[in-house]
Every structure is written in structure tokens, then in C-alpha cells.
Amino acid sequence: MPDADKQASLARAARLFGVLAEPARLRILQLLKDGSMCGRELAGELDLTPATTCHHLEKLKLAKLLSQRRSGKRVYYSAREHELARAIRQSLAAPNNSGVNGKRAPGGRGRKPGKTSGRKAPLKTQ
């Protein structure tokens, strides 16, 4: 892949991750995992104004993570099914942050979070 193509690909990925860096947008994807919802329903669930919700929905649509359909005056949104959307849903559904597929991150050695190696620092004497 030529350098220009690599740079363009990295720029697209960075924009996508920027879209996903907003917790409200991740919550929208989480709410839509089981089916479609209209914008007003989403706004109520998110405790956001319809205008703010619409802004987040538009960003997700531009990133091609959502599809929409109109029914009368309402617009219903659905999460688009592709590999990235599945990965996002799986990470949101994980009961803890123990890593991919429930395995601990490399180097964790089974220690509890916040624990040190067990060695105590030497006491300073004056």
C-alpha cells in the first residue's frame, strides 16, 4: 500500500475513533443493539435534548455506523451490522475491562487492580 493510501486510511480511522470517543454516541449504539428506536426515544433514554441527540445521531450516520428509516413523522435509527459495530457492542457488553474474550491483558499476572508487587519500599532513616 503506497504511503498516501496508508495516510488516508489512518486519517479515516482517526476520524472514526474521534466519533466513538463521545460516551453518548457509544450509549446510542448500546441502546440500538436490540433493535431500532426513534430519535425522541433515544433522547429520553440519554436524558439529552432532541437537538443534542440529533447531533450525535448525525455523527454516527456519517461514520456509517447507523442507518435510518422514516415512518410518518418519526425517524427510526438502527445500528448497521458490520465488524466494527459488532466489536463495539461486544466491548460495551463486557462485564468488566479484563481484556478481549474475558482474558486478562498480557502482563497482568493475575494480580488484583491496585495491588503492587508486594515488596515494600525501604524505610528512610535520618
Image (cartoon, rainbow, N blue to C red):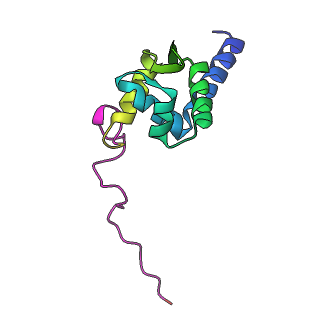
Location of residue 98 (image quadrant): top left
Name above or below for residue 84 compared with residue 53. Answer: above
Residue at the far front in the pictured view: 72
Queried whether the magenta region covers residue 96, the answer comes back as no
Residue at the far bottom in the pictured view: 126
Identify the residue shown where x is 41% and y is 31%: 31
Location of residue 114 (image quadrant): bottom left
Q: Position of residue 71 (x, y in %)?
A: 49, 14
Name above or below for residue 124 compared with residue 63. Answer: below
Q: Between residue 72 and residue 93, name the one nearer to us.
A: 72
Horizontal side of 82 relative to 20 (left or right) equals left
Q: Position of residue 75 (x, y in %)?
A: 52, 19
Queried whether the magenta region covers residue 122, the answer comes back as yes
Identify the residue shown where x is 57% and y is 20%: 61
Name above or below for residue 24 compared with residue 61. Answer: below
Residue at the far top in the pictured view: 1
- What segment carries the magenta color? 98-125
Identify the residue shown where x is 54% and y is 41%: 48
